[in-house]
Amino acid sequence: HSTRPKVLVTRKLPTVVEDRLRLTYAVTLNTTDQAMSKAELSVAMSNFDALVSTVSDPLDASVLKVGERQVQLIANVGVGYNNIDTKTAGDEGITVSNTPDVLTDATADIALLLILSVTRRAYAAERKLREGRWEGFSLIDGLGRSMQGKVIGIIGMGRIGQATARRALFALGMKVVFYNRSPITKLDFEATQVDTIDQIMASADVVSVHVPGSRSSPTVTAKHIALLKPTAYLINTARGDSIDQAALVAALVENRIAGAGLDVYLDEPVVPNELRILDNVTLLPHVGSATEEVRTAMGMVAADNLDAFFSNTSLPNRVV
Ligand code: 8YV
């Protein structure tokens, strides 16, 4: 290229990634690191050759369909790409890539953290200590539940589901059952596939969700949530709309389940107040992939996809 492709990076990335991008592209950075509006993104569609976007960018049809579009590639930083209307992108001939694999372990680590945190009541215990309400050792206060020999139900046995299952099995000694929309025959650890989400809900002590989101039809419905045992915990590190959030909140408020560990929400960064006041939930602000190593790796994967696109070679992580 005699003129370097113009790339808009919608959110700040680790400096090494920004530096790498600047070597090859005419890069515009969003130095405020505030989420960009649809209006700003629409303008960008006509002014840049590519976007390095992320979950906070609502790239819906109204944004993607601009009169004189210049953007050819959207390299989304994240394995999930529910922020992009991929159908419209496809129709418009816009290429989309994501950043799988590099965040699998980090996200499964957060699932494990949430499982331990809620089953051992870490939040309530730490709060008690910090607020000066700890009155000394007790043999009966604040008891959690042991997970050894209990059942973890994984919904969505993809990369992150499998990595979470391994942790539950090998670190916690749990038994693994899972639901996956297609059969999975090759696993190098012990796990039982069942045919329906209902079976998972009714039998698991911990249910961990690892399926993409869908605002119109969450995979884990209110009916599913109603099947959970009163002693069960629900863990979600996928997307807020992978589950029926309102139904989960109701189940928690009405004490129909034991607790929940959440890293994702329906309308981030809004977290329902009903959740925020509960002691038996651990609430994290979408930090599944939030390590220096992994965020750097994710940025580098997005850059790899840009490089492939602009050198006309096949994209390592094409989604559309
Ligand atoms: C990202 C994620 O940090 O990869 C995903 O899908 O949810 C997180 O790893 C975030 O969504 C940025 O895209």
Image: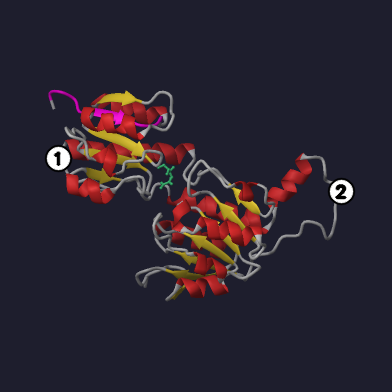
> What percent of the width, then of the height, locates residue 282?
62, 50
Q: Earlier in the sequence, mark 1 or mark 2?
A: 2
Q: Is residue 147 left or right of residue 214?
A: right
Q: Which residues are magenta?
A: 2-12
> What percent of the width, then of the height, locates residue 96?
26, 45
Asked whether 189 falls inside the magenta stretch, the response is no
Q: Residue furthest left?
A: 2
**Which residue position holds label 2?**
136
The quadrant the N terminus occupies is: top left
Asked whether 3 falls inside the magenta stretch, the response is yes
Helix, strand or loop status at disc 2: loop
Q: Nearer the viewer, residue 119 or 165?
A: 119
Answer few, some or many: residues within 10 Å of disc 2's Cα (few below 14, many 20 plus, some between 14 and 19): few
Q: Residue at x 12, y 23 (%)?
A: 2
Q: Residue at x 72, y 50 (%)?
A: 124
**Which residue position holds label 1?**
312
Q: Is residue 200 left or right of residue 313?
A: right
Q: Residue at x 21, y 30 (%)?
A: 46
Q: Amino acid at mark 2?
A: Gly
